[in-house]
Amino acid sequence: MKITNQGLCSIALLTGALWGCILVEKLTIAHARADADRALSEIRALQLKKHILPAASPVERPKRARPALG
């Protein structure tokens, strides 16, 4: 059994295509993460610009005295 020259070239071509796909995937993920980080920082900046404050914590109501029965 022998690998022909044509078979060897096709293996090399397919291996190069696979590495190319892996590289493109890594670059796409890096760009997506950078875009997400940029979007989150813009959201934070807009919230600070509008002076959005968190809701106040609830105030405890004074307890009413119940009339005693009997």
Image (cartoon, grey):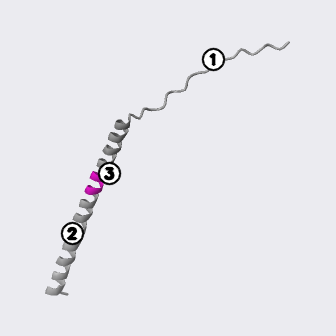
> Which of the pair 24/67 is nearer the observer?
67
Q: Residue furthest right?
A: 70
One can see residue 20 in this view: yes
Q: CA distance from mark 3 to mark 2?
A: 24 Å
Is 35 part of what is drawn in magenta? yes
Asked if the magenta segment contains residue 44, the reply would be no
Image position of 42 with respect to 7: above or below: above
Q: Which-is-in-front pick, marks 3 and 2?
A: 3
Q: Name the residue tied to disc 1.
A: 62
Kindly check if marks 1 and 2 are in contact, taking CB atoms under 8 A apart as contact.
no
Q: Position of residue 65 (x, y in %)?
A: 71, 14
Q: Residue at x 51, y 27 (%)?
A: 57
Disc 1/disc 2 C-alpha distance (Å)? 69 Å
Residue in view at x 75 percent, y 16 percent: 66
- Please state if 59 lies on the left or on the right of 69 as rendered: left
Residue density around tag 2, few if under 14, some if 14–19, many if 20 or more, within 10 Å: few
Q: Which residues are magenta?
A: 30-36
- Please state the horizontal and vertical placement of residue 52, each as a whole percent of the image: 41, 35
Q: Earlier in the sequence, mark 3 or mark 2?
A: 2
Q: Is residue 4 visible?
A: no
52 up-or-down from 37: above or below = above
Question: Of helix, strand and loop, which one carries label 2?
Answer: helix
Residue 51 image position (x, y, % from top left): 38, 34
For residue 20, the mark is 2
Mark on residue 36? Answer: 3
Residue 45 image offset from top left, x and y in percent: 32, 40
Quick one: label 3, few (<14), some, or many (20+) residues within 10 Å? few
Name the residue located 32 percent from the left edge and 51 percent from the top edge: 36
Q: Earlier in the sequence, mark 1 or mark 2?
A: 2
Which amino acid does the dot numbered 2 rest on?
Gly
